Amino acid sequence: MSSDVIPGADAQFNTFQSVVVNAVEKNAESWGIPADVVTTTTALQAKWDAAYSAVMNPATKTSAAVQTKRLVRKDYEKQLRTVIKCYITYNPKVSDTERLDMGLPVHKTTHTPVPVPDTVPDVTKIDRNTVRCITISFRDSDSDRRAKPAGVQGAVVKWIVSDTPPTSIKVFTNSLLDTKSPITLDFEEEQRGKTVYFALAWQNTKGEMGHFGEIQSSVVP
């Protein structure tokens, strides 16, 4: 396998994703993977299964079906990379045997302490130029540069579409981690015109999160 853990060919990718996601679902609690991360991953898997099945059936394989499969795989691949990188590769709760069973490489661990982030991602721009999408640019609150703090894997954004302003981040129903700015949130057609509330926090390479910044909002375009 090359340095990229994600197989290139669709057939190999289909087998790979099934093994990884099955392991994630089975071991999410013992590996410390948040429930909303599992939910997002399995939802994207369902979209992939449908899109892949369509192109594998000569009766439903159209140009539109092939294009849909490509777009679905792009989103699904991004989520798989995040899950693997943030919750499996260096997770001490995942054994080397389990990584090998998933077709993932085993890396040497480091004994260098990684601190829990003590700053927050500051939102610098909210882009609403694309229908059903909100793109959030951010940087560290303790820096005027876009670089992440030392030991930080990426930014976690939690959000909820709600008719009333939430009083706690605990009620947020969606979560996404991205390793660099910006983060793009996708919404359904029926959510257009509604208000989404969100907040960001840094997550280190050990999967530990710092505190969330202030709750912000935007209207879904």
Image: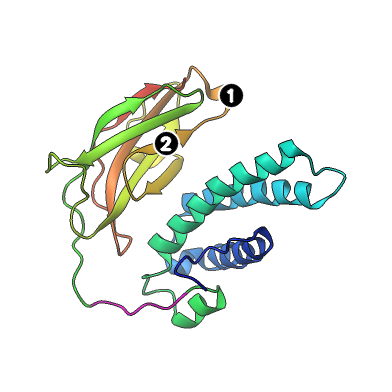
Please state which amino acid type lies under the numbered disc 1: Glu
Q: Position of residue 39 (x, y in %)?
A: 54, 50
- On screen, 216 above or below 49? above
State the predominant SS element of the stretch in magenta.
Answer: loop
In this rendering, does residue 32 appear at all?
A: no
Nearest the viewer among 143 and 55 is 55
Q: Counting other residues with Cα less than 10 Å from the Cα at mark 1, is it few (<14), some (14-19), or many (20 or more)?
A: few
Please state which amino acid type lies under the numbered disc 2: Thr
Determine if the magenta segment contains residue 109: yes
Q: Position of residue 170 (x, y in %)?
A: 37, 42
Determine if the magenta segment contains residue 2: no
Q: How is the image coloured?
A: rainbow
Q: Position of residue 73 (x, y in %)?
A: 59, 49
Residue for badge 1 = 189
- State the separation of the CA atoms marked 1 and 2: 16 Å
Q: Is residue 122 left or right of residue 37?
A: left
Q: Which residues are magenta?
A: 105-110
Query: In terms of secondary structure, where does tag 1 sit?
Result: helix
Q: Which dot marks residue 176? A: none
| Residue at the (44%, 79%) spot, across then down | 95
Q: Counting other residues with Cα less than 10 Å from the Cα at mark 2, is it few (<14), some (14-19), or many (20 or more)?
A: some
Of pointers 1 and 2, the one earlier in the residue sequence: 2
Query: In terms of secondary structure, where does tag 2 sit?
Result: strand
In this rendering, does residue 103 appear at all?
A: yes
| Residue at the (77%, 46%) spot, across then down | 54
| Residue at the (64%, 63%) spot, across then down | 18
Nearest the viewer among 130 and 217 is 130
Q: Position of residue 188 (x, y in %)?
A: 57, 29
Residue for badge 2 = 184
| Residue at the (30%, 65%) spot, across then down | 206
